[in-house]
Amino acid sequence: MPLVVVPTPIGNLEDITLRALRRLREAELVACEDTRRTGRLLAHYEIKKPLLAYHEHNEERLALELAENARQALVAFVSDAGTPLISDPGYRLLRACIEAEVEVEVLPGPSAATTALVASGLPPNEVVFLGFLPRRGREREEILGRVTREEATFVFFESPHRLNKTLEELPAEALVAVCRELTKLHEEVFRGTAGEAAGRFAEGVRGEIVLVVRGGAVAEQASNLEEAVERARRYVLQGDSPSRAAARAAKESGRKRGDVYDRLVGSS
C-alpha cells in the first residue's frame, strides 16, 4: 500500500481535485499538520477518517512509524494548505518511505508559490523558490544579496509583520508582486517596485503573503549606466563637450545626468 501525498486548497475549498478527494476517501488514515483544520476540510466533503497529527515538532519521532503503517494500509498525508513538503513538514516521512521501499504516490495540486508566480506578471523562465525568508542574521543578508545581484525571479513566503522590513531592504527600483490571501475572499496582488510596495503597505497588512521579486536590480542598473556612459563617450568623439554628451545620453537612457557625467569624466 502507498503513502499518498495529497495537496489541499490554499484558500478556496473548491480548489481540490477529484483524484485527491477519491484518495482521501480511500485512505485508512490521514496524517496532517492540524487535525482541526483538516477535519473541517474533510467534513466539508463529508469524509470521515481517523486523523493523526504529524507536524514539525513530532515528525522525526513519527516518520518511521508512519512509513511502516503505509506498508500495511493506504495512508494519506496532507499539510494545512497547498502541496505538502513545500515549506511544510513531510520530507522526513517521504525519505523514510523511500528508504523502506514503501510506495509513494504524489498527487498534483495547489501551491501558493506557483499561483503567485503566475499572478505576479514577472518572468517565469528562471525561478528561485526560497520558502520563508530568514528573520535576521547573515543568512538573510546573503539571500537578499542574491536577490540584488542575480537576474532571476525569486519567490518567498513572508509574514505580514515583516513584509515592510523586507521591502525596505530590497533595492527601491526592484520589480515586485505582493500576493496576499491568494484564492480567498480578500485576495490582492500588488505589482510595482519595492519602493512603491513599501509605501502601499506602510500602515501594515494582514493575511498570508507570497512575495515575488525580479532579481538583479542593481546589476541591471549598473549595466544600464554603463550603456549610457558608452553612448556619452561616442558623443564626445563626435565633438560634444563631456557635459553636453552626458546630458544627451542621460536623457535618452533615463539615467541621472550626474551619474553619467561622473562616470564619464572619471573613466576618461
Image (tube, grey):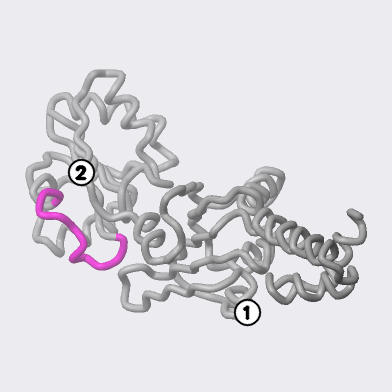
Q: Indicate the secondary structure of the residue bearing disc 1.
A: helix
The one nearer the camera, 28 or 217, is 217
**Left or right: residue 18 compared with residue 229:** left
**Left or right: residue 127 compared with residue 2:** right
Q: Quadrant of residue 62?
A: top left
> Does residue 12 belong to the magenta stretch?
yes
Q: Which mark is residue 199?
A: 1
The one nearer the camera, 11 or 175, is 175
Per the rendered image, the range of residues in magenta is 10-20
Q: Residue at x 48, y 74 (%)?
A: 190
Residue 252 location (% of width, % of height): 69, 73
Q: Residue at x 37, y 78 (%)?
A: 186
**Left or right: residue 55 compared with residue 138:** left
- How many C-alpha atoms fall within 10 Å of the one at disc 1: few (<14), some, or many (≥20)? few
Q: Quadrant of residue 174?
A: bottom right
Residue contact between numbered discs 1 and 2, judged by CB atoms under 8 Å: no
| Mark 1 / mark 2, whichever is N-terminal | 2
Q: Indicate the secondary structure of the residue bearing disc 2.
A: loop
Total numbered badges shown on the rendered structure:
2
Whether residue 206 is situated above or below residue 68 in the rendered picture = below
Say which amino acid is labelled 1.
Gly
Q: Which mark is residue 139?
A: none
C-alpha distance separating marks 1 and 2: 40 Å
Say which amino acid is labelled 2.
Leu
Residue 199 location (% of width, % of height): 63, 79
Q: Residue at x 59, y 71 (%)?
A: 193
**Left or right: residue 204 compared with residue 111:** right
Disc 2: which residue: 107
> Does residue 54 belong to the magenta stretch?
no
Which quadrant is the N terminus positioned in? Answer: top left
Residue lying farthest to the front in this orientation: 238
